[in-house]
Amino acid sequence: MKLKHLVLAAAAPLALAACGTPSDAEGTTDVATAEAGAPITAEEVAAAQTAWGEGIVAIGKVFTEEGDVKAAAEKHIADFYAYEGGDTVLFKPTLAAEDQFRGDADEALSYFIGTEGTEDKGFAIKPWTAVRWENEGTVTDGDSAMAMGNYYFTDTDGNDTKVEYTFGYVRAEDGSLKINLHHSSVPFSS
């Protein structure tokens, strides 16, 4: 089943059940999640996507306000990625050519906030003002799920950057969804 033009208004309340949502300029706040072991639903995936996007926007806001951007990004990674759970995380960020794959939280942090002397300029500190998702499809399989489509990052001038993605999710012991696969790339251009 194709899911085009995700209706965020319907998904936003579910974000509270799936993942943390931004509560202030310091990043995301953990909230109630589904029971550990419960099957993952497509609605939870949509909610997790919304919350992840809001977290990226929050990191940029912290950066703009000259707050503790490292702490905000570390919290985002802990809230949304399965690095701490001991799961393998397959992370291939969009703007990475030299260090293509980010197998641990420190490498993900470098991508999101930048590291001097590397290709990492800080994707999340651009800053972005919104992230919009268009799922081509979502596959759920008990305690795991995958979603693929396009997401759009809106900059401070109101321009959208279209990025293709595939995200995989697992349910953590606390019942929240964690990303164990994140692949994104800019669309092919001939």
Image: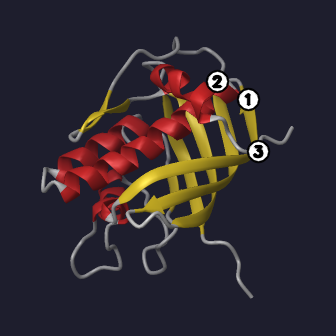
User: Residue 188 location in percent, x, y?
Assistant: 71, 78
Q: Which residue is mark 3?
A: 4
Query: In the image, residue 90 lies at what x, y percent?
Result: 53, 54
Residue furthest to the front in view is 157
Can residue 38 be seen? Answer: yes
- The three-letter amino acid code for the residue at tag 2 is Ile
Q: Is residue 72 left or right of residue 162?
A: left
What amino acid does circle 1 point to? Asp
Comes first in the chain, label 2 or label 3 = 3
Residue closest to the eye, 177 or 125: 125
| Observer-nearest of 9 and 113 | 9
Cα separation between marks 1 and 2: 7 Å
Q: Is residue 127 above or below residue 120?
A: above
The quadrant of the picture occupied by the N terminus is top right
On screen, residue 127 versus residue 182, left or right, reads left
Compared to residue 156, the image places residue 119 above or below, namely: below
In the rendering, at what x and y percent does residue 128 appear? 39, 58
Q: CA distance from mark 3 to mark 1?
A: 21 Å
Q: Earlier in the sequence, mark 1 or mark 2?
A: 2
Q: Secondary structure at mark 2?
A: loop
Q: Are marks 1 and 2 in contact (CB under 8 Å)?
A: yes
- Residue 143 visible, this orientation: no
Spatial CA distance of label 2 from label 3 is 20 Å
Q: Point out which mark residue 40 bears.
A: 2
**Label 3 amino acid?**
Lys
Which residue is identified by label 1?
141
In the drawing, does residue 68 fall left or right of residue 149? left
Residue visible at 14% across and 50% down? Answer: 68
Q: Which type of secondary structure does the marked residue at label 3 adopt?
A: loop
